[in-house]
Amino acid sequence: MAKLNGKPVPEKEKPEILYVFDPLCGWCYGFSPVITRLKDQLNSDVDFLVLSGGMVREASPIGEIAGYIKTAYKVVEDTTGVKFGENFLNDILGNGNAIFSSVPPAKALAVLRIHKPGKCIEIAARLQKAIYFDGIEVDDYTAYSQIAKEFGMEPDDFLLQVKSAEIAEIVENEFKLVAGMGVNGYPTVLLRNGKETQLLSRGYMDYESLYNVVKESIST
């Protein structure tokens, strides 16, 4: 049985959408409105869980891949309709010195997912907005603590938990869980129904297409 937070993942009575993303994945940022809308429409019929994949495990300056991002973000904008903020483009990407690592925002998600498990889709979307629109530095835990406050958590409590050894272990196990599921690209959406797990989408998919795939899968 798969494990999350060091414990077996129990079978759900309702089908469960597993949204595997990475906080630094630009296509996941573009996919945020899609998966958020899907949750709004199907929340009464389906549970939702967000898992971080650990796309960038080794911290390095964003300037090392700035050239790629400067081209890729425009494709994401044109395809999905999301916008990357000027603070990110000018300050973070333009300067090039900010640390780029999936680990800090994955830790933030892990803490807030425990605090508000029913809001994990919204939390993931908010974290990506903070990075790619608001232009926070990805290792700025104080900025994440203010997001925690938006979701009803005391910033000081968040800061205490996000830097704990327990959360570090949870995130490491989460990365291993995703790898063990065979997921190596983001965004990926799976449907877990009892003991069966079904791949629904890999890569960006528009809302109508994803909705139709999910409805067909949960009705069979």
Image: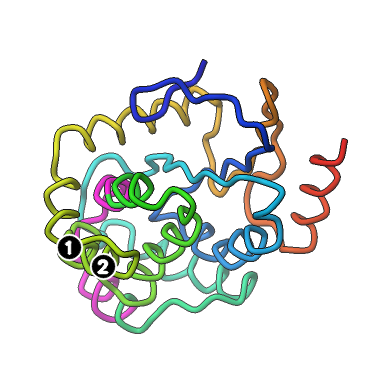
Nearer to the camera, 62 or 37: 37
| Element carrying mark 1 | helix
Rendering coords of residue 139 (x, y %): 19, 57
Relative to 168, 123 lies left or right:
right
Numbered label attached to residue 149 = 2
Numbered label attached to residue 155 = 1
Residue at 67% in and 28% down: 197
Relative to 72, 166 lies left or right:
left
| Element carrying mark 2 | helix
Rendering coords of residue 68 (x, y %): 42, 61
Relative to 61, 41 lies left or right:
right
Residue ranking furthest to the bottom: 86
The amino acid marked with disc number 1 is Pro
Nearer to the camera, 85 or 219: 219
| CB contact under 8 Å: marks 1 and 2 | yes
Instruction: Based on the picture, tell me whether residue 101 belongs to the magenta stretch.
Output: yes
Rendering coords of residue 153 (x, y %): 26, 60
* The C terminus sits in image quarter: top right
**Residue bounds of the magenta highlight:** 89-107
| Mark 1 neighbour density, 10 Å: few (under 14) some (14–19) many (20 or more) | some
Residue at 52% in and 74% down: 74
Relative to 34, 123 lies left or right:
left
Nearer to the camera, 109 or 114: 114
Vertical placement of 37 versus 107: above or below? below
Rendering coords of residue 143 (x, y %): 20, 67
Can you tell which quarter of the image residue 124 is in? Answer: bottom left
Nearer to the camera, 114 or 87: 114
The amino acid marked with disc number 2 is Lys
